[in-house]
Amino acid sequence: MKKMIGVLALGAAFASGNVLAWGNDGHRAVGAIADQLLKGTAAQAQLNTLLLPGESLEKISTWADCVKGSYCGPQTPEMLDYVAANPKHSEYHYTDIPFQNAHYHDHAVGSADDDVVQTLKQAILVLQGKDDAASNPHQFTKRQALILITHLVGDIHQPLHVGAAFVARDGRFVVPATQAQVDEVAIFDARGGNNLLLDDAKITALSDASIPAPLAVEEDAAKPASTYPKSATRPLHSYWDSTVVDYAMRRLSTRTPEQFAREVIASGPQVSVNTGAPVTWPYQWADQSLAASKIAYADVVAGPATQQTGRKGEVYHVWALTVPDNYPVPSSALAKQQLIEGGYHLASLLQAIWPQ
């Protein structure tokens, strides 16, 4: 019989929406891949007119998370102005299409006017110089559009930032036919996997065990095994944000996003090719991430809902997950491929906007 990991205790869960897709290293890896692919191109010359001295795609890749106040130090005046002009900016990073679906469609269940697909469309038109008041309602500048594209191309390739889990009270994954069916009584939005909880110690132990011992020992001596606070449980979303990226990098014996980028580019990876006008590419990326999210949720089983009460008295529900005991292997392999796809797609998008 297949061994399974069960959550033994439920701690406080993140009831908020999606958080830092790919985490710091993942976003920087996407930017670093694009930086290296664009060296010497016309696109790089155009980038230099929008980037500040010392900036690169890798360095600006986390800007859109930093404006949330996420571990980046004091906010700059540029960040404060952006936040003031974009009160819904945290919603630009994801969409919530049921992971069982094959395609993203405008106005489908889980989509929104300010989701990652629509925001990328707006930013692409701005960089192309094809925007108007209707297509750029947020009045993004070209620099803001570049910053957003660099970050959101990473976000849209994180499977849980597109493929969402909707859960019945008994833990069944369901597909709501309308948004109204997500009533938080019979059908719940799992908040991008934030309300689906893994046993932290067990998933970490299995992840460590899936890496060759010499590399695991060397890396463990260099830095902590996890950047998450010690707790009994970890949201599935946070596992996909950073843990899978960490193990994908370790399997390549790389310690930094720049090293990871060099290694994967040298390997000549197979990457999907975008077709049609660049403004349609976010739809293709969303569909690809929906396919990836099916792998992320393969053989994942949720238990019955447990009611929780947040610090401000809000009531929400969480579900304890069981996952296959080999889960870290396919998840880190998928993360590696999605990071590569994100970096290559970012580079190809910028080259399409600014061709040779």
Image (spheres, rainbow, N blue to C red):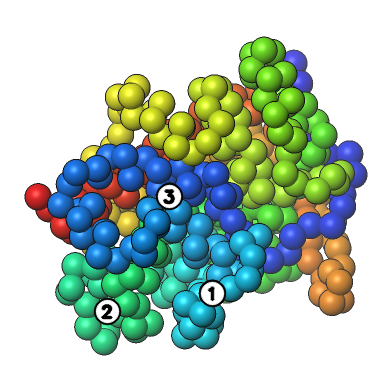
Residue with the mark numbered 2: 135
Question: Based on the displayed image, in which of its 4 quarters is residue 222 positioned?
Answer: top right
For mark 3, give the secondary structure: helix
Instruction: Give the camera-side residue of 226 and 239.
Output: 226
Identify the residue at horizontal 52%, vertical 85% (top origin): 84
Question: What kind of residue is marked 3?
Answer: Glu
Measured as percent of width and height from the top left, residue 16 is found at 69, 66
Mark 1–mark 2 Cα distance, whole angstroms, equals: 27 Å
Whether residue 242 can be seen here = yes
For mark 1, give the secondary structure: loop
Measured as percent of width and height from the top left, residue 108 is found at 42, 66
Identify the residue at horizontal 72%, vertical 18% (top origin): 217
Question: What kind of residue is marked 1?
Answer: Thr
Identify the residue at horizontal 15%, vertical 52% (top origin): 42
Who comes first in sequence, dot 1 or dot 2? Answer: 1
Whether residue 153 can be seen here = no
Measured as percent of width and height from the top left, residue 57 is found at 38, 53
For mark 2, give the secondary structure: loop
Locate the N terminus by quadrant. Answer: top right
Q: Please state if 13 lies on the left or on the right of 24 as rendered.
A: right
CB contact under 8 Å: marks 1 and 3: no
Local packing at callout 3 (Cα closer than 10 Å; few below 14, some 14-19, many 20+) is: many
Residue with the mark numbered 3: 58
Above or below: residue 147 compared with residue 232: below
Q: Please state if 73 lies on the left or on the right of 355 as rendered.
A: right
Residue with the mark numbered 1: 76
